[in-house]
Image: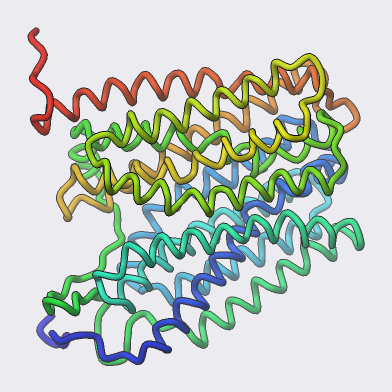
Amino acid sequence: MSQVPRSPVSTPEWRAWLVWSVGVAAYVLAITNRTSLGAVGVEAADRFQADASTLALFAVVQLAVYGGMQIPIGVLLDRYGSRPIMTIGMLLMAAGQLTMALSPSVGIAIVARILLGAGDAAIFPAVLRLVATWFPAQRGPIMVQFTGIVGQAGQLIALVPLAALLHATTWTITFGSIAGLGVLFAILVALIIRNHPPERNADVTVNTDTGVIRVVTSAIDTGVGIRAAWAHPGTRLAFWSHFTSPFAGTAFILLWGMPFLTAAQGLDTAHAAGIISVYVIAGMVLGPVIGDLSRRLPNYRSMALVLPAVGVQMLAWIVVIALPGPAPLWLLYVLAVALATGGPASMIAFDHARTHNPSHRLSTATGVTNAGGFIAALIAIFLIGLALDLQGAGTPETYSLDAFRIAFLMPIPLWILGVVFILIERKRTRIRIGLDPDRRR
């Protein structure tokens, strides 16, 4: 590393912002790709003559591939840097959406979701690496938050323009258009993004106040590293916090929200899109607020932020499905805001992982933590679809409010399981770091 200049960043500010802007725009498109099926779930069921379990399988496969690719992506980023990995990721998503556009059957559509999940997995870690290599280290945390907030706009793009394009044209034109955007952004990434500023010859992050230079790493250790991370109760607390907080909102936005609001609650597409838009916007607004509270309350994050967020979600969810008839519009907006707390609250899990693990194990602990939310979302999405099928309400023609009431009971055991383990691991963590006395055996 002796060849790397040990001086403050001299790259022009505009160049760093240009690289970040292209990277975050690619991330917005990745989010649009990720949530595209949720915006047109009813139309997808009609096109493929798919029952609810099969429709859920589309999302489950996509998320499973996304989660499973995190370790390989980390290794590849450390070897090749952000630019080639992002370019390949955009091309994979474009191939997935083109396959979806032309798919004549469920089997081919599942292949399309596999390609989509693999490409999506590459984008966010690569953009975070660009933040670390192009901006001063002390600006990193706020840039990461900003990246996440801007990226969520992709959900709005999937929700409104994508659905409108589908209703105005055809399935093939709509998903073919997204594929074309993917190719365009692959070209932009290849032309504009560079792994690191030209005055450096490695992916490093520089603290411009102290001159300290650190190598940027993304890889997740295997074997001993994973076991060592899981052995610390703080990592397990992080895992269960991420498991419990965001999965209901993920299941809602990724697949089941639009069918529930239109087919079960009887809303038209515009009102349903408005409710899901409120979910997205509320999450973007609540993110900085909950992030600041997490900074101010480091020893009370679980009790003051994570568990209240879970409680608000459970309460709103149960009230909506317990009503004898369709919920009033205002209550559905309340549900959207309640579910929106889950995403920002889940980010606290990464604070736990960072706090309780040494720097050489941070990527491993982060990967373990990130798996929690995906596992819970996979289970919830699949169980809701299975519950609909078992009631004979697995297609858009047979969706009903009563069937969704039963199906939407499926997340409740997951919330309860998560809360129990959060309380257990929180106590163990506080004992481990000396905040609580050890319990007598």
Determine the residue positioned at 12% across, 75% down: 212
Lateral position of residue 181 relative to residue 85, left or right:
right
Determine the residue positioned at 33% across, 82% down: 196
Location of residue 72 (image quadrant): bottom left
Residue 280, position as x, y percentages in the image? 61, 50
Image quarter in which the C terminus is found: top left
Residue 221, position as x, y percentages in the image? 25, 51
Frontmost residue, 243 versus 189 = 243
Lateral position of residue 325 relative to residue 284, left or right:
right
Frontmost residue, 325 versus 176 = 325
Determine the residue positioned at 72% across, 19% down: 405
Lateral position of residue 425 relative to residue 169, left or right:
left
Task: Give the colour scheme of this rendering.
Answer: rainbow
In the displayed orientation, state which residue is furthest to the top. 441
Lateral position of residue 124 relative to residue 320, left or right:
left
Image quarter in which the N terminus is found: bottom left
Location of residue 74 (image quadrant): bottom left
Q: Is residue 275 above or below residue 212?
A: above
Q: Is residue 334 above or below residue 108?
A: above
Frontmost residue, 328 versus 398 = 328
Query: Looking at the image, how many numbered discs can be counted on the residues?
Result: 0
Residue 104, position as x, y percentages in the image? 83, 51
Q: Confirm whether residue 17 shows in the render.
A: yes
Residue 65, position as x, y percentages in the image? 52, 48
Q: Is residue 233 above or below residue 409?
A: below
Q: Confirm whether residue 365 shows in the render.
A: no
